[in-house]
Amino acid sequence: MTLIRPASEVPGTGGPERRRAGAGRAVAVLVLVTLGALTPLLGPSAALHGTGEAAAPGAGGIALLRTVLFAALCVPVGEVFADRLAGRVPGAPAEAPRRWAPYAAAAGFLAALGLACVVATGNLVPHSLAEIDVGGLYRSYEGRLALLEVDAFAVAGLCALSRRPGTQVWPLAAVVVAEALRAHPPAEHGASTGAALTLVHLLCAALWVGGLLRVLRTLGRWRDGAAGAALLGRYARVAAVLLAAITATGVWSSLRRMPADTVLDQLTTTAYGRTLLGKVLLVAVVAVLALCARIRLRRAADPLSACSPARAEVVALGSAVAVSGVLTALPLPIRWG
């Protein structure tokens, strides 16, 4: 006599509830990715509306490429960071989620290549290959930084596929340095200070965003609730320091570009200020969600119930990354007075 087991009991298959849950997650991810793409594409024109400022050619596309580059940086940095935290948890399970670093490196490589093409045409969107002056990249400061980012993502991808994926921290560090230097060229007043602030801000943001994503994915594989709560607690303690560093460097950088006596006006009358205000509000939401997760982690009967606000925190952080991409494509604020 042959017994037919339900689909939910057959290895490799799932019951109707599991399939519906999987489909729901897929739809949610698709919606979030779509919104994440629309934010940088439409953000510059929305922020510039009514300000009288002129947008750079292809600002939406540049913002999208910069958003992809930032996200591609966050994922592998967060994986290295979170995996080290997980390795320090006593009795941590051996299971770990699949690494997304190789895919992130590929996305970062393509985004950096697209941005390099823009730089090679004099910061204009190229309409044909003939317009791209590759040799010109080596002769300009911004061009050399763009090439460095392209090469760094290529090397990071190779490191991620190697037997020692931790070595990708070095090319990723090169991307962070290149972005900090790009944002503050030598001709800018106090360029070294601005670059240092941007470097710390970007590195801490990558650790926060990518680290939380990796921690939540790791908890999805672990079945040991005590180990999961310990990992989330370790991350929460580091995240508090990262938030403080991000806030301090963000405020300092903003005051360097918008003097204190002009901030309130420029937050509402300039595209950069409006977008910065939106980012500040998003970070405030993230801070509240992080606090809720921390309270649940400490006081709830099930510490892993903190994963619910933490998932919402990841979504809000992803939105902040997209808004950061928009900021890089907008004209810098005017230093009045």
Image (cartoon, grey):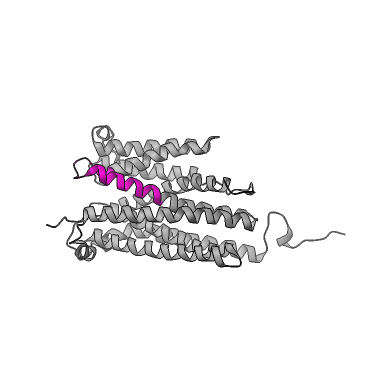
Picture quadrant of residue 282: bottom left
Q: Is 58 situated left or right of 12 in this image?
A: left
At 74% across and 63% down in the image, what residue appears?
6
Q: Is residue 295 above or below residue 250?
A: below
Query: In this rendering, would 291 be left or right of 194?
Result: right
Stretch of the chain drawn in magenta: 182-205
Q: Position of residue 73 (x, y in %)?
A: 41, 46
Image point (33%, 54%), residue name? 248
Q: Position of residue 326 (x, y in %)?
A: 31, 56
Magenta stretch contains residue 203: yes
Q: Can you tell which quarter of the image residue 191 is in?
A: top left
**Is residue 19 highlighted in magenta?**
no
Task: Name which residue lies at 34% across and 44% down.
Answer: 114
Which corner quadrant holds the N terminus?
bottom right
| Res 216 visible | no
| Frontmost residue, 247 versus 52 | 247
The outermost residue toward the right is: 1
Name the foreground residue: 280 vs 331.
Answer: 280
Q: Is the stretch drawn in magenta largely helix, strand or loop?
A: helix
Question: On screen, 160 above or below 9?
Answer: above
- Residue at the image point whose x is 48% and y is 66% from the top: 292
State left or right for residue 67 relative to residue 213: left
On the picture, is 75 further left or further right than 266? Answer: right
Residue 283, image x, y percentages = 37, 61
